[in-house]
């Protein structure tokens, strides 16, 4: 039964990911992303990480994808753009350079991590408490970590999402008659 659940969830994840990349209509791509996120949630449940599965569905599939769809609909998906016209001539070479740099950094990190003399990483206090105790300790450790040590980053992320939505609304808003932009 576990193998069947894994195969079905993996098919959902891979099918949704391929749909995100290959779909030309942005709304269909966003809905394929929902399929991918639900597949990941099923994989979390299979690993008995029910809290992460719930967060995956509520936060990502529920809130973030809805935000994506809101922005897509607000910008208007019926417009056809010419992808041959580039706003900046250096855009593609810069993207290739940044991609090559990231690939080299990831490769170096893998090579260093495989080194036998590499220092071992010790788990933090929150992770150690979660490993030592019951399942409730895991949730308590995550909550303590997010709402005490990283509360500023957590709140800045929510402010950033609100600013992104407001900016999108302002950019997509059509001026009324007699209004100057």
Image (cartoon, rainbow, N blue to C red):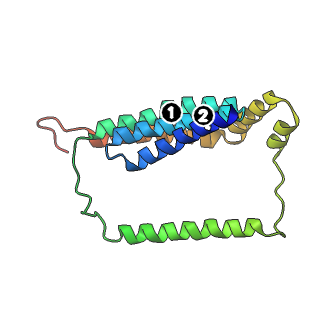
Q: How many marks?
A: 2
Measured in 3D between alpha carbons, the distance from the residue under mark 2 to the one under mark 1, in whole angstroms, is 10 Å
Q: Residue at x 67, y 37 (%)?
A: 3
Which sits in the foreground, 29 or 145? 29
Q: What is the secondary structure assignment of the residue under circle 1?
A: helix
Q: Is residue 16 above or below residue 48?
A: below
Which residue matches tag 2? Answer: 41
Does residue 35 appear anywhere in the picture? yes
Which quadrant is the N terminus positioned in?
Answer: top right
Mark drawn on residue 160:
none
The secondary structure type at the circle numbered 2 is helix
Lateral position of residue 149 relative to residue 72, left or right: right
> Where 48 sits versus 119, above or below?
above
**Nearer-the-camera pick, 144 or 118:** 118
Q: Is residue 153 left or right of residue 145?
A: left
Question: Left of 115 or right of it: where is 157?
Answer: left
Residue 61 marker: 1
Residue 10 on image: x %, y %: 58, 41
Please state, as top left, top right, bottom left or bottom right, where the C terminus lies in the image: top left
Task: Name the residue at 83% across, 69% down.
Answer: 116
The vertical placement of 108 against 83, above or below, is below
Tag 2 near tag 1, CB within 8 Å: yes
Badge 1 density bin: few <14, some 14–19, many ≥20, Cα 10 Å: many
Q: Residue furthest left?
A: 178
């Amino acid at each position: 039964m576990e193998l069947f659940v894994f195969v079905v969830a993996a098919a959902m994840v891979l099918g949704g990911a391929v749909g995100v990349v290959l779909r030309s209509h942005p709304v269909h791509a966003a809905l394929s992303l929902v399929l991918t996120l639900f597949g990941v949630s099923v994989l979390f449940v299979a690993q008995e990480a029910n809290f992460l599965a719930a967060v995956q569905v509520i936060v990502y599939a529920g809130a973030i994808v809805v935000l994506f769809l809101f922005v897509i609909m607000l910008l208007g998906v019926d417009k056809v753009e010419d992808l041959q016209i580039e706003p900046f001539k250096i855009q593609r070479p810069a993207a290739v350079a940044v991609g090559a740099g990231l690939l080299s950094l990831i490769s170096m990190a893998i090579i260093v991590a495989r080194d036998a003399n590499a220092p071992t990483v010790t788990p933090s206090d929150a992770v150690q408490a979660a490993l030592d105790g019951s399942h409730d300790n895991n949730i308590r450790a995550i909550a303590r970590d997010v709402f005490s040590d990283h509360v500023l980053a957590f709140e800045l992320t929510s402010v950033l999402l609100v600013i992104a939505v407001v900016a999108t609304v302002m950019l997509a808003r059509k001026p009324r008659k007699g209004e100057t932009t």
